[in-house]
Amino acid sequence: MEYQAQRKEKAKDTRRAIMEAASQLIRQNGFEKMTVRDICARAGVTTGAFYHHFASKEALLVQGFSSLDDHLEESLSAYDLQDPAEKLVTLLRCYAQYTEDLGWQNMALYYTRRLSDPEASSMSPDRFTLRTMRECFEELARRGELAPAYDPARAADFCFRHFRGVLIDWILHRGGYPLWPKLEEDYGMFDLALRAWPDRPA
């Protein structure tokens, strides 16, 4: 591995360790009681390394816990050739695993911070998660497997907003139910509604 690639990989590992340490500490003690020194001690990194990646504890909450796209892109790199319908399932399963690993408390804090930020946007069409959903629906459309009434971009936007709504519901229930079975069940309903099945009545 080349030097630059090694540095990039090490930086990703450091960032991930910081995020995981912060996630654990928030679940144990709460966000307000957690300090940067606590995070560094748990992650096994220096404070200089922390501030190289995050300007503050608050920045970690907004930037770090919103790194879902990075996680999904890395997780789905082995599924490039997967059938688009199956790839959507893989995407949702990784989405559920990521958020459950962070915990409902962390996700609640993240959305609270997002709501208080006047510059926060809802969803860029260029983000990996939404873009991948759209590409899957576009491929289904090319194959004639998406019902003609549905535009791929609109279908992707609708599904993403629904699944994010499920995440909010999960937070409101304080993580009281497993997230993935709910997402899987709902995806099955969307699959029936959006797909162009050969035996479906005209």
Image (cartoon, helix red, strand yellow):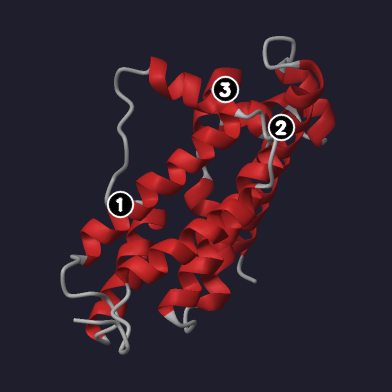
The mark closer to the camera, 2 or 3, is 3
Query: In the image, is residue 10 above or below residue 59?
Result: below
In the rendered image, which quarter contains the C terminus? bottom left
Badge 3 marks a residue whose secondary structure is helix
Q: Is residue 194 left or right of residue 167?
A: left
Please name the amino acid that badge 3 sits on.
Leu
Callout 1: helix, strand or loop? helix
User: In this figure, which residue is indicated by the disc labeled 2?
Assistant: 23
Please give the name of the residue rendered at 62% of the width and 29% of the height, measured from the top-left corner: 173
Nearest the viewer among 107 and 165 is 165
Q: Is the Cβ of the residue at disc 2 closer than 8 Å to that at disc 1?
A: no
Question: Observer-nearest residue: 3 or 88?
Answer: 88
When the figure is inspected, residue 27 is found, relative to residue 151, above or below; the finding is above
Instruction: Give, as a three-letter code, the residue at label 1.
Output: Phe
Q: Position of residue 2 (x, y in %)?
A: 61, 69
Which residue is denoted by mark 1 in the rendering?
158
Q: Position of residue 115 (x, y in %)?
A: 40, 20
Q: Which residue is mark 3?
A: 109
Amino acid at dot 2: Ser
